[in-house]
Image (cartoon, rainbow, N blue to C red):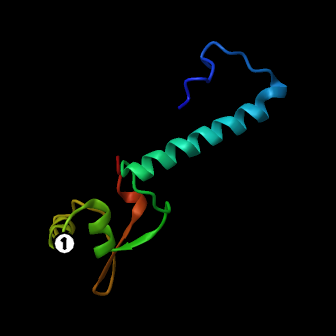
Amino acid sequence: MFCDVPNTSTMSITFNEVPEALSQLIERLDSIEKLLTENGSIVKTEPDQLLTIQQAGELLNLSVPTLYGYVQRAEIPVNKRGNDSTFLSKSFSIG
């Protein structure tokens, strides 16, 4: 897919070429992220998204009772409001 791209480790970029190079880099990173997301290799979430215990279970591929066990043993970070447990998606490292 990117085989026609020059070897950037030996390529010199002038100051005036930085904006174009940065633009190309962002496009390439977006393409990689899209491929990984479509492949199922990564799950994309918002950095500070609050998740219910059901959503956290789906994200981590764990059952709700298993998550409750982790919470009781303080093995997983949780936010408690009354009887509700919520999780910050950024607390889970996926990949």
Spot occupied by residue 67 in the image (x, y as percentages of width and height): 20, 68
Specify few, some or many for label 1: CA neighbours under 10 Å numbering under 14, 14-19, or 20 or more.
Answer: some
Place residue 59 in its image quadrant. bottom left
Q: Secondary structure at mark 1?
A: helix
Q: Residue at x 59, y 38 (%)?
A: 28
Q: Is 67 on the left-hand or right-hand side of 23?
A: left
Seen in the picture, residue 93 relative to 76 is either above or below; the reply is above
Q: Residue at x 28, y 60 (%)?
A: 60
**Camera-side residue of 30 and 71:** 30
Toward the right, the furthest residue is 16
**Camera-side residue of 13 and 31:** 31
Q: Residue at x 16, y 64 (%)?
A: 73
Toward the top, the furthest residue is 10
**Camera-side residue of 51 and 2:** 2
Q: Is 71 on the left-hand or right-hand side of 7?
A: left
Type of amino acid at the residue the image marks with label 1: Tyr
Q: Is 82 on the left-hand or right-hand side of 2?
A: left
Spot occupied by residue 40 in the image (x, y as percentages of width and height): 36, 52
Q: Residue at x 35, y 56 (%)?
A: 92
Spot occupied by residue 15 in the image (x, y as percentages of width and height): 81, 25
Task: From the image, tell me which residue sits under label 1.
Answer: 68
